[in-house]
Image (cartoon, grey):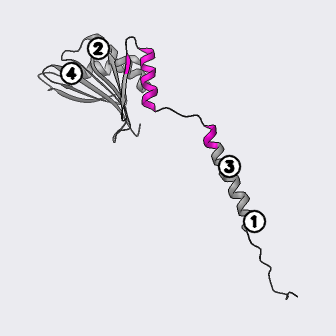
């Protein structure tokens, strides 16, 4: 016989097992329902290849996708650096032609979702500032994009990045 102040305790174990099973099934169903996503670099490279004539995806190494185009010596799109979320790199002749600048502008417009006029203007300003007065390395900011242009005796390059916090 139970005394008057005695509480009858029940175990929670019978309730835990079905609750755990239900949460595990919901988690598995959530992962199975979501489609596999490609890397942002892969998506950007495919979009570039589809929208720009004569541009081809060459190969992928680590977080970088290398591209080829007749106007450029080297092209690449890189993702997830320590200070940037995505980077576009292009290398061409020492004195870049207007076609090369337009190519870089069109690529940057697609990768960074900024207007083509703005990206072409930024690339043109950066590449044309290199010279005797300002030197062979120019770093500038235009329309929330970081542009870094360098020049050697035989070639010029431009790297366009957007910071992680933007």
**SS for dot 2:** helix
Q: Quadrant of the C terminus?
A: top left
Residue drawn at (30%, 21%), measured in percent from left and top? 123
Do labels 3 and 1 touch, CB within 8 Å?
Answer: no
Residue drawn at (44%, 28%), measured in percent from left and top? 42
Q: Which residues are magenta?
A: 30-57
* Residue 133 location (% of width, % of height): 12, 24
Viewer-closest of 135 and 159: 159
Do labels 4 and 1 touch, CB within 8 Å?
Answer: no
Q: Residue 141 vs residue 49: left or right?
A: left
Residue drawn at (40%, 11%), measured in percent from left and top? 53
Q: Is residue 141 above or below residue 116?
A: below
| Residues packed near mark 3 inside 10 Å, few (<14), some (14 to 19) or many (20 plus) | few
Q: Which residue is mark 1?
A: 14
- Report the Cα–Cα distance between label 4 and label 2: 11 Å
Do labels 2 and 1 touch, CB within 8 Å?
Answer: no
- Place residue 94 in its image quadrant: top left
Q: What is the number of the mark on residue 82?
A: none
Q: What is the number of the mark on residue 25?
A: 3
**SS for dot 3:** helix
Q: Which residue is mark 2?
A: 100
Q: Earlier in the sequence, mark 4 or mark 1?
A: 1
Q: How many marks?
A: 4
Q: Quadrant of the N terminus?
A: bottom right
Do labels 4 and 3 touch, CB within 8 Å?
Answer: no
- Report the Cα–Cα distance between label 4 and label 3: 56 Å
Q: Earlier in the sequence, mark 2 or mark 1?
A: 1
| Residues packed near mark 4 inside 10 Å, few (<14), some (14 to 19) or many (20 plus) | many
């Amino acid at each position: 016989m139970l005394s008057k102040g005695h509480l009858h305790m029940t175990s929670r174990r019978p309730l835990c097992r079905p609750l755990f099973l239900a949460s595990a099934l919901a988690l598995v169903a959530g992962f199975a329902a979501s489609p596999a996503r490609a890397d942002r670099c892969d998506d950007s490279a495919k979009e570039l290849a589809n929208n720009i004539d004569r541009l081809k995806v060459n190969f992928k190494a680590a977080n970088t996708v290398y591209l080829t185009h007749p106007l450029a010596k080297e092209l690449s799109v890189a993702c997830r650096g320590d200070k940037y979320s995505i980077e576009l790199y292009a290398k061409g002749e020492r004195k870049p032609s207007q076609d090369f600048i337009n190519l870089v502008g069109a690529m940057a417009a697609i990768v960074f979702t900024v207007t083509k006029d703005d990206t072409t203007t930024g690339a043109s300003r950066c590449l044309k500032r290199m010279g005797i007065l300002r030197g062979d390395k120019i770093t500038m900011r235009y329309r929330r994009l970081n542009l870094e242009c360098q020049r050697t005796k035989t070639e010029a390059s431009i790297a366009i990045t957007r910071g992680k916090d933007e």
